[in-house]
Every structure is written in structure tokens, then in C-alpha cells.
Amino acid sequence: MSEVKTDRKYTETHEWVLEEDDDIICVGITDHAQDLMGDMVFVELPEVGTEIIAGQEICVVESVKAASDVYSPLTGEVIEVNEELTERPELVNQDPFGDGWLFKLKISSPTTEELLDSDAYEELLGQS
Amino acid sequence: MEKKTALAEWHMDHGAKMVPFAGFSMPLHYGSQLNEHHFVRKEAGLFDVSHMQITQFLGDVIPMLQFLLSQDVTRTHANQASYGCLLNETGGIIDDVIVYNVHEREFWMVSNAATKEIVLPWLTQYANHFKVDMRALHSHSMLACQGPRAAEFMNVRLGGATDIPFFGFLKSDMTILARTGYTGEDGFELIAPHAEVKAVWEDLIEMGVKPCGLGARDTLRLEAGLNLYGQDMDASVTPLECGLSFCLHLDDRDFLGKAALLQQKESGTHWVRKGLVLKSGGVLRHDTEILGSFGKSVVTSGSYSPTLGFSIGMARLPKETKDEVTVRLHGKEKIAELVSLPFVKRQKL
């Protein structure tokens, strides 16, 4: 049973989206995703200023087991990345919804209807 | 439906993430394979390796083993084990094994879990030919206690452990305690009936040895420059091509594959095993492409090295290859440096 927080939205590719402001979202990977991947060893973060489209690969998380692409949930521009992950990739395992956040986007089209709410994500995981 | 070792319930009760491996349900880790890896290098870890095949040979065993193995077992004395390979006619490796010289008329062998379907029939046919009594020991389990403190813990539980020399072993009835391992650290492997292995396991845990899974086992052995059958070698690879010349004894006896190996050694043009490191980010993995003036090769085993903090890997390359090669990761080309093995040396006791 993995943790699913009710204060945010989700994607089918196991990213979470936390709305911080009207047009700013914070993105990370879910507890389910970090558990599947195992101990993280490298996180390749996007560059601040990168323009990205919803569904595009935006960064890579690499565990001892495998490398996995992270997909941008929405369209926008990268305004901040979690630099701490360069030194401490294990934060993604230890606190995937908090200190293990990956990047923040200034979104250009708030199409959050496409995203799953926590109930729908739980259903996707077969946990509901 | 996977087979279970005698310790499977214990693993599940203690937070293990179980995965299928060679037909068995085995612990991948108990929370963090990185923590388990570090603990083995600093203290002592405990591995359930009961999935491996344990076989006892009785009778006039030596002629059979002399014919089938890369190593010459007559170079071992009683209570000494040797690492080597079962070879085929072309000098290729059928499996890597540890062979225990109990006495002239009794030897034990531990071979891999994943090769049972091939190795058991192979050995059976030769046992019949050489009139050797061969017994697969289904009644037995096996644990490995590895790390700089392994001897300290084992001594408390099974006195006399520290006196066993490297690759030596003690045998008592149907139990073998050997100073062997697959991590590069000091350590012991206990081969015994299920109940005994379970009891020793639980006692060692109580003393402070930590359980470690297959994830840590793989990163530890790779750091130690140890091969994994199926990745670093297979039936098409000879001992000369994968860093195992040290257990290939070409003199004094006839054996399966000898002619082919003598020829290969004489020509000297075969590729050899080399170590690679990737100091920039990214992880070398099995089948990662390698490019060079020689054309193409692949990484045979690759992973992140928890002790070193960067990725390491092994590959078959021309003998003359040195300094660096190009590897292709995630579509990008990166430079990997060539280094000598092992990547990590045994911690000083």
C-alpha cells in the first residue's frame, strides 16, 4: 500500500502535481513510483527556463535498478528545481511528496481537468 | 508458483521486498539495498543463498572432477575449497562453482540456482560414466555472513571460525562452514540442514548482523570484480575471456575443453575482461553499448557502486584497450575510464 496524498493531483505516469499558486505547480514522483524504483542514485533535473509541453519527458530519475523518465504533467516553463537532489537523491525515496520534490513550473494553460484526483489515482493503483 | 527457501517466511515477516529469482521467491532488500551494502562493507551482513544448488559426490570422485573442471582439484588438500568452472568441449563455461575437498572420496559442489536445469543433467551423465555416487542435497540450506566483523560474530556462534583459512572449511557430519563469499569482504558460508541454518540465522540477527538481499549482493560482488554467470560469462565464453585464468590449470591432466583452451591461449588474440568507471552521472548497465577503434562491445555487468559513489562495469574488450572508451547511455555518448579490478578492495580487519 503506497501513500496517496489528497491535497494534490496525479498523472497516469505516477507524477504528482501540487498547485502552489494560480499558475505555479510543484511536481514530484509518487510514493508508488519511488518504491517501484528502489534506492535513487542520480537525478537529472531540467534546466531552469526550459519550456516544456504536457506529456514530454522533462527529467530522469535513476535508481540502482533502472533509469526512469519523468513526464511533465502540464505545459509551461521550469522556474525552479530541487538542487538538493544532486547531493541527496535519496530524498526522493525518503520523502517523495515533500523534500523529494523535483521541479516547479509556471504553467501556461491550467488544464488540470486532465489530471487525476487522489481517488482516481488510488483506483489506478488498485488500492481503492 | 515460486519455490521458497526455509527462510522465506522469516524474510517476509521482516519487511523484505520479495522478487522472483531463478524460480525462487527471494528478498531483493529489506528496506534499502544501499544501506545493506554499506553495512556489509563496515560491519557484517547476512544473505540467504539457499536457492543455490548443493551437490555431494561420493566414491572415486577425483577422475570425474579432473575431467570436468577448469581447476585441478588435486591442488587442494582436505578441508580446502576451490573456485572454478564446469567447461564444455569448446572451453566455454557451463557454470561457475565452488568445489569442497572433504577427502579423497568425498567432494561437495555449490553451483548456481539459475543453471540447475543444465548442470544437474550434465553432472549426472558424467557421474554415471565415472561411477560416482552423486546426491543433490534438497535437505540443505545455505547462508553467507560477510563483512569485516563476520569472523567476530561467527566465532561467538560457531567457535573456531576465525581459525579457518581463506577458502578453507570445517565439516561436521552433514554441515560445512567455509571461509568463502561473494562480496570481496571476509566472510563465511554455512551449508547445513534447514533447521540448523535457520537457527544460526536467527542467532546472528539477534547479535546484530543485518539481513541483506539480492540487490546488495549484486552491487557488492561487482565492486569486488566477481563475475555473475549469465551476464559476465556463458557457454560461449572461455575463462581466458572473462578474467578467470587464475582458476584454469592447463597442465598435468586431460580435461574437457583443454585443446580449445590451449589453442586460444597460444593465439593470444582473444578479448579479455576489463573494468570501467563512469565518473560523470549515469549508470552503466548490462548491455550498455561501448564504442571504440575496435568497433562495438557491451557492458556485461554494470551498476552504481555505493562505496565509490559512481557507476562501475565490466566488459570484454581487446587486450590492448586502455585509458578510456566511449559508452552510449540514454542516447548520449559519455567517456568511461578503464581501471584495474577489483574496483573496491577488502576492508582492512
Image: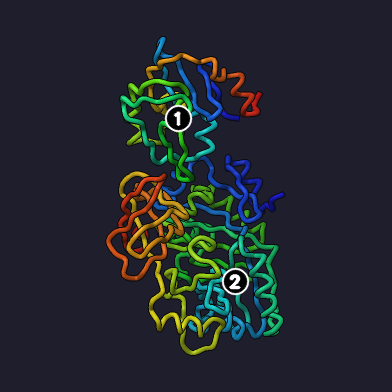
- Residue B306 in the image: state x and y as whole percent: 39, 48
Q: Which residue is mark 2?
A: B109
Quarter of the view holding residue B223 = bottom left
Rendered residue at 52%/53% (across/down): B46
Q: Is residue A67 above or below residue A125?
A: below
Is the image coloured rainbow, by chain, by secondary structure, or in one colour? rainbow
Rendered residue at 61%/70% (across/down): B172
Rendered residue at 67%/85% (across/down): B130
Q: Chain of mark 2?
A: B
- Residue B305 in the image: state x and y as whole percent: 39, 50
Q: Secondary structure at mark 2?
A: strand
- Residue B186 in the image: state x and y as whole percent: 43, 61
Mark in the foreground, 2 or 1? 1
Give the left or right position of residue B101, taking residue B335 as reference. right
Q: Which residue is mark 1?
A: A56
Gap in angstroms between the C-alphas marked 2 and 1? 53 Å
Q: Chain of mark 1?
A: A
Q: Are marks 2 and 1 on the same chain?
A: no
Quadrant location of the C terminus of chain A in the rendered image:
top right
